[in-house]
Amino acid sequence: MEIIEKIEDMRNKSRALREANETIGFVPTMGYLHEGHLSLIRMAKNECSKVVMSIFVNPIQFGPGEDFERYPRDFERDCRISEKEGVDYIFHPSSQEMYGEDYLTFVEVEKLSGIMCGAARPGHFKGVCTVVLKLFNIVNPHVAYFGEKDYQQLVIIKKMVKDLNLPLLVKSGPTVREKDGLAMSSRNKYLSREERKNATVIYTCLNLVQELIYKGERDLSKIKKEVLDRLKENESVSKIDYFDFRDPESLDEIEMIGKHGRILAATAVWIGSTRLIDNKIIEF
Ligand code: PAF
């Protein structure tokens, strides 16, 4: 496995791989790898002849007062794990390498970036899209892999790829969960023992939504009330940014189930001082 820190070296490598008719699978990450990332690496390994993973904690997707400084990092551990998984190249640039001193260009997918997580974290998706587009331009992959836990991010990136005619395929992998249902996230490390135990309420609520829909409830405002009550009862839940029902493709809000065959239930909940997101697609 090779570690590449410079943009020019990554570009040259990618050009050489393409000239050698290799297919490049790309897994962008912010490091501190968990099973969710590994499942994407395994998908990429299965489908492509070379796998590039980026590890870059992207400063511009964190707002003022968010957890950029304390975001968990362990590059050596990440390298050991990646090597074992058969990653061929880790692209690990510095912030200076990515943004320099006089950086001025940003990418925004309008409308979709201002709802759900975007409403609570203004500028977040602009930072995500900007770095992802830069990484796509540098790595030049055939296929890029993203996790479905960040469902809104996935929809926004697919839209950016479509709108900007980017020559690559975006694929996604299902959310990987702990045994008790908590979605795997690098941020789970912030949780105290008590909070970790109580954090399962998020998955319980997503399952409750499914149960109520399967029992015949069609009015999503009633389901939302029940779910919010359940969340508020939990002593570790300190804030609920949103609990939304949306069309899984357009992210348009759904209030009443009509002809929809699938809906997305998505939420961002603060467990103590840790903001966790999760979602479930309910098919019926
Ligand atoms: O999902 C993430 O880890 C990040 O948002 C990404 C896509 C690597 C961009 O920094």
Image (cartoon, helix red, strand yellow):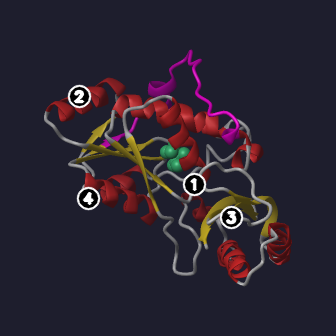
Q: Secondary structure at mark 1?
A: loop
| Kind of residue sitting beneath label 2 | Arg
Quadrant housing the C terminus: bottom right
Does the residue tagged 1 have its C-beta within 8 Å of any atom of ligand 1? yes
Identify the disc placed on residue 31: none
Residue at 56% across, 47% down: 155
Crowding at mark 4 (Cα within 10 Å: few <14, some 14-19, many 20+): few
Q: Position of residue 174 (x, y in %)?
A: 47, 64
The reply to whether dot 2 and dot 4 touch (C-beta < 8 Å) is: no
Q: Is residue 34 visible?
A: no
Relative to residue 17, is residue 250 drawn left or right?
right
Q: Would you say 40 lies left or right of 256 here?
A: left
Q: Element at badge 4?
A: helix
User: The residue under label 3 is which amino acid type?
Assistant: Lys
Query: Could you say which disc has been placed on residue 259 in the image?
Result: 3
| Residue bounds of the magenta highlight | 90-113
10 Å crowding of disc 2: few (<14), some (14-19), many (20+): some
Q: Which amino acid type is shown beneath numbered disc 1?
A: Asp
Between marks 3 and 1 in the image, the one whose residue lies nearer the viewer: 3
Spatial separation of the CA atoms under disc 2 and disc 4: 21 Å
Compare marks 3 and 1 and give the one earlier in the sequence.
1
Q: Which mark is residue 15?
A: 2
Residue contact at pointers 3 and 1, CB within 8 angstroms:
no
Question: Label 4 sits on what residue type?
Answer: Asn
Task: State how far apart marks 3 and 1 are (Cα).
Answer: 26 Å
Q: Is 111 on the left or on the right of 131, as rendered?
A: right
**Tag 2–tag 3 contact (CB < 8 Å):** no
Give the mark, 3 or 4, whose residue is nearer the N terminus: 4
- Pointer 4 residue: 46
- Mark 3 to mark 4 CA distance (whole Å): 37 Å
- Between 92 and 134, the one lying in front of the other is 134
Please identify, in this view, whether the residue under mark 3 or under mark 4 is nearer the observer: 3
